[in-house]
Image: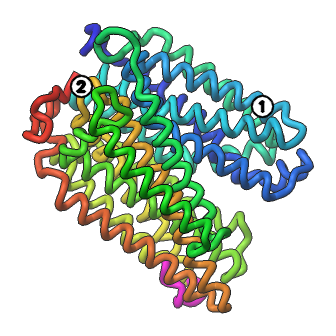
């Protein structure tokens, strides 16, 4: 601990508000696209670009902002995220065309990049053992459950008050979050002289990740084998090689690759990427039931209601199991249950009511598995991160979430679209879902082979592994 300060429920609520204000802004817009398009007089393409910008900028800068949080202060970086969220929300409240819509979405991407890793780092700094696992459970409720909560609230608010009120409420939530965190002391790594930052690494990283994100998000439109897509892949590969070479030769780095020598952290991060990739299952399922089964968007939403309830309820259950048996078993159970749920969602050969039941159960198991997995995985990544690099490590972990989701959605949508073009929608749904089953199976294997059996069992101070014995792993 850095000041003797112990985290409080007030601090936890403030952090959860921070996570929720990001998702309320980032996710809710998906539910009100027609209203925004009509009200602002912009094209559907413009709205879709605005939607993608938040994920893009969040993914590009989350590692850099996590590293900055370690240096300049985790609370300070969280507050910067709150302020960016407020300004971004105001842009949408007063938007009357494309300009403020675009600016607001970009600012929200920066906001998420600042809030996500810094709040995880604050929880590591001021909570220990079972208390930290409890705090991370609530963080996971805000993060993993935030997408569903934001979608539901966004739709309800837009229907009753108008879509701009979503962002007025987002501002209120952000202000409350800042006030609740006001009493929390600052947390950062010990000063080692003047401010130093890896600007060279940041530029290389941004170029590389930008190429990768454009390829993932626009690959279906550009064509996966087009010259543009091939060029983007070449830029990504060369960028990664140069980035690794440059970072390996410097003392001040954007990403300390030593964190990946810890198998538990690596297993949590890889499985996190892959389970987030199964978000493609939601896209395939919602598209298929509406186009292939003739359901309305409201009916499709009801099918996924079990997912929202299950993920919110099971996150605390996953925390309790973590405290009793460690992280590995609930992570394995979570990935297995999620994969089974996805498989049930792909039984498109079933007729009528049979398929509806299979889809509902599948969605519920999907959320139940993610709930089992969320806290054990987050706690494993945090507890195995070096104390002076926890913001950076959290940034990498959350970047894996963003990239995994974008990758899974792009691959799943492209697979579904390619097969659906032939007119066989049932096969398109089944094969699109099979892609996500593969993601789930690889996630299971990554946990089995990389996460140690004793991960998370010690309630106070996880044991140091040889891989990072030269670094402290608790505050």
Q: Is residue 241 magenta?
A: no
**Residue 282 location (% of width, % of height):** 55, 65
Mark 2 Cα shell of 10 Å, populated few (<14), some (14-19), many (≥20): many
Q: Residue 86 location in percent, x, y? A: 68, 25
Q: Is residue 72 depicted above or below 413 in this figure?
A: above
Which part of the image, by quadrant, shows the N terminus?
top left
Look at the image and tell me in which quarter the C terminus lies. Answer: top left
Report which residue position mark 2 lands on: 128
Q: Who's the residue at 71% across and 63% down the image?
A: 298
- Pointer 1 local density, CA inside 10 Å: few below 14, some 14–19, many at least 20: many
Magenta run includes residue 348: yes
Q: CA distance from mark 1 to mark 2?
A: 39 Å
Q: Residue at x 55, y 63 (%)?
A: 231
Residue matched to label 1:
91
Q: Is residue 192 above or below residue 413?
A: above
- Report the residue that reaches farthest toward the left: 466
Q: Is residue 459 left or right of residue 224?
A: left
């Amino acid at each position: 601990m850095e000041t003797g300060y112990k985290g409080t429920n007030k601090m936890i609520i403030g952090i959860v508000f921070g996570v929720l204000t990001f998702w309320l802004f980032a996710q809710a817009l998906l539910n009100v696209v027609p209203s925004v398009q009509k009200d602002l007089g912009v094209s559907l393409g413009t709205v879709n670009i605005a939607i993608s910008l938040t994920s893009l900028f969040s993914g590009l800068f989350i590692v850099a902002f996590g590293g900055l949080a370690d240096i300049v202060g985790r609370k300070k970086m969280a507050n910067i995220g709150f302020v960016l969220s407020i300004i971004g929300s105001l842009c949408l409240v007063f938007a009357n065309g494309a300009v403020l819509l675009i600016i607001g979405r970009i600012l929200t991407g920066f906001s998420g990049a600042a809030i996500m890793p810094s709040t995880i780092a604050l929880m590591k700094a001021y909570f220990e053992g079972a208390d930290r696992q409890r705090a991370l459970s609530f963080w996971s409720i805000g993060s993993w459950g935030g997408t569903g909560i934001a979608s539901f609230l966004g739709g309800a608010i837009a229907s009753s008050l108008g879509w701009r009120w979503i962002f007025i409420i987002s501002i209120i939530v952000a202000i409350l979050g800042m006030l609740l965190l006001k009493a929390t002391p600052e947390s950062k790594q010990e000063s080692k002289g003047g401010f130093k930052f890896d600007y060279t690494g940041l530029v290389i990283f941004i170029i590389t990740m930008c190429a990768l994100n454009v390829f993932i998000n626009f690959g279906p439109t550009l064509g996966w084998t087009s010259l543009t897509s091939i060029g983007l892949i070449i830029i990504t590969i060369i960028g990664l090689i140069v980035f690794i070479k440059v970072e390996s030769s410097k003392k001040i780095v954007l990403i300390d690759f030593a964190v990946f020598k810890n198998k538990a952290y690596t297993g949590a991060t890889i499985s996190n990427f892959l389970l987030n990739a199964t978000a493609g299952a939601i896209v395939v399922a919602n598209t298929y039931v509406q186009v292939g089964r003739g359901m309305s968007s409201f009916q499709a939403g009801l099918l996924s209601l079990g997912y929202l309830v299950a993920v919110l309820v099971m996150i605390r259950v996953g925390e309790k199991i973590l405290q009793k048996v460690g992280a590995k078993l609930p992570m394995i159970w979570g990935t297995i249950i999620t994969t089974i749920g996805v498989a049930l969602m792909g039984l498109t050969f079933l007729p009528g009511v049979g398929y509806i039941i299979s889809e509902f159960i599948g969605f519920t198991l999907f959320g139940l598995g993610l709930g089992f997995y969320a806290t054990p995985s987050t706690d494993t990544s945090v507890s195995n991160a070096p104390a002076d690099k926890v913001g950076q490590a959290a940034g990498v972990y959350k970047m894996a979430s963003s990239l995994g989701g974008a990758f899974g959605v792009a691959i799943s949508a492209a697979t579904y679209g390619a097969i659906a073009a032939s007119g066989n929608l049932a096969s398109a749904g089944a094969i699109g879902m099979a892609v996500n089953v593969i993601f789930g199976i690889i996630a299971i294997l990554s946990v089995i082979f990389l996460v140690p059996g004793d991960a998370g069992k010690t309630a106070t101070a996880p044991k140091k592994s040889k891989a990072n014995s030269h670094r402290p792993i608790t505050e």
